[in-house]
Image: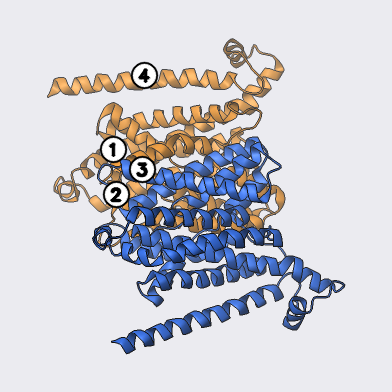
Amino acid sequence: MQALINHSKLLKTIINLIAFITLIGSIGLSVSYGSTKVPIETVWQAVFHFQPDISAHQVIQELRLPRAITAALIGAFLAVSGAIMQGMTRNPLASPSIMGVTDGAAFALVITLAFYPSVSNLGGTFASFIGAGIAVSIIFIIGTLSSGGLTPVKLALAGVAIGALLRSISSVISLHFQLEKEMGFWMAGGLDGANWNAIKILIFSGIIGMLIALFISKSITVLSLGEEMATGLGQNNTLIKILGIVSVLILTGVSVSIAGAVGFIGLIIPHITRFIMGKDYRWIIPSSAIFGALLLVLADLVSRLVNAPFETPVGAITSLIGVPFFLYLARNSGGGSK
Amino acid sequence: MSTVKIRKRKQFILTMVTLILLIIVMFFISLSTGVIQITPMEVINTLLHNGTEQQALILFDFRLPGIVLALFIGAMLAVSGTILQGVTQNDLADPGILGINTGAGLAVVLYIYFFQDMLTLSGPQSIFLMPFAALLGALFAAGLIYLLAWRSGVNPIRLVLVGIGVNAGFSAILTILQLRMDPQNYRQVTVWLAGDIWNANWNFVLALLPWALLLIPIAIYKAKALDVFNLGDEVAAGLGINVEKERGLLLLIAVALAGAAVAAGGAIAFLGLVVPHIARKLIGPLHQMIIPISTLIGAVLLMIADTIGKNILAPSEIPVGIVVSILSAPYFIYLLMKVK
């Protein structure tokens, strides 16, 4: 038995390692392909022997590399948010985009930009934390007020409705203040705003969010087995849930403030990693980060190549990947056999 | 028994008359408000061909077609929602939430995309063909949703959930398609998809008219079948109704109404959800009464939403679909909390 566990731990580590190497390779591909192809050796030189007078090096350092890194970080953050949400609520449909959390963040960003047009990057990030918080609170209140309690599926539907509501209000505000372009960007999701400054904010928030996530990962495993059992084991569920929500708000909020509402990553990736890694969230959370990063880097690459030289919003690509998966889940968890 | 029936009939007539009066009042309010104010007296004068040329231009060429269109679209979406809720026995059914509207929208955008060089967008042939394209898209969406939600029966919540998924998929395809269009068409399509009665002109009204005038009466004529569905499939079959045939026909009417409405007014969600609930509250569960009442409520609600959208943040106009969503999404959440 012991040997089996060790073996499977080794196996899991190897899988994660392979995924991580694939991720690095994909980032390399993403930097190398684009409106003009740059050979992979040039990419290597631009990163490790940067020469400012070569224009290809400039393009890589200032545009493509930050973009690929941003994609990786945001993919990781959204996937971890989804994993925490699914673990805490035992709801297979929970994820930042389905539950309206990304819409809440975008909503706050539109309001902030309407009234304080000169808001800084950091200010925008802070606003989107608050917006994500508003969406989570509304869902929480609905769950509490609902007399019979909300089933997972109904909670997901409530999230969709809240998302629609917040999106509509955002549209009104953006129409009035002529912010349609910004609003369109946040709603569709895109990575063309990536730069080193944004990456600094991403890394700073990401460290806090990820540390919390890893810190509570063991407790989430217990929580995912059932609330009574977790209480029985002497776990302070309220504290864990608050920490979990804080982590989701930070990770989702910072992602939306930089790349808009990129959907479905937080839904798909946790399911895939649970399938590979089993039920232990100490494994699921780090793996989700790697796989989420991989998915968004590749989706971004596709979004730039599918209609070159024009960019397709990366959110549309992740939706196309995510919808069949969502439909599969909806069929299986759609309440009852009839 | 018969006194109950008579009382019910009286109540029905009273509600109908009240709603028609409300529509007339809203009609004049809507005609007289806007960036350029025209008093209701002037409106009447202009309608009687006694107004100034400028007033006649504003009323006949700009405001009137928009308002008439809003009336028809509201009525059609409301009836579509009523039928969908009746047939699927599902309080949460609505052509917008189920993705039927987006399916119709996708078909229209495909149509514009492939024929944009051959036709001018608001030219007459293009407008009269659009409802047919929308109908095909709506039918495809409805079929797809039903198929995907089917698992030895269709559970209401699963149907809505699948609808949301299909909706998201169509939306993603739409986003990609839109970016491949030339900028002029792109802008029009974007505004139109938000649920705007864009570019309202009499051609749109004419294109929509046959659909509304043909399908809504058929729906009222078929209303009895909807009442029988309430009793369950076995009872319905026992009463000599060909359940599958009637269900198919009614669904076809609902999808066609939604499709045609989308072709003219864009994707307006939630209206078809809310109206049947209001109608049931007002008149009870009989569909023969619910459908006419829904027709009028849908018409008046969309006219109100259109007027709000045009005036509340003037000079910015808010697409009517967004106004409807803001007003109705909370009600959807409320319903959700009640559904078992």
- Which residue matches tag 2? B247
User: Does B315 sit above or below residue B255?
Assistant: above
Label 4 crowding class (10 Å Cα cut-off): few <14, some 14-19, many 20+? few
- Which residue matches tag 4? B17
- Residue at image position (85%, 74%) is A54
Q: Do labels 4 and 3 share a chain?
A: no
Chain B colour in the picture = orange
Q: Which chain is blue?
A: A
Which amino acid type is marked by label 3? Ile
Where residue B270 sits in the image (x, y, percent)? 43, 40
- Residue at image position (69%, 66%) is A66
Mark 3 belongs to chain: A
Label 1 crowding class (10 Å Cα cut-off): few <14, some 14-19, many 20+? many
In this view, the mark in front (1 or 3): 3
Estimate the spatial distance between the alpha carbons at disc 1 and disc 3, rounded to whole Å: 35 Å
- Left or right: B111, with B81 as reference point: right
- Which residue matches tag 3? A142
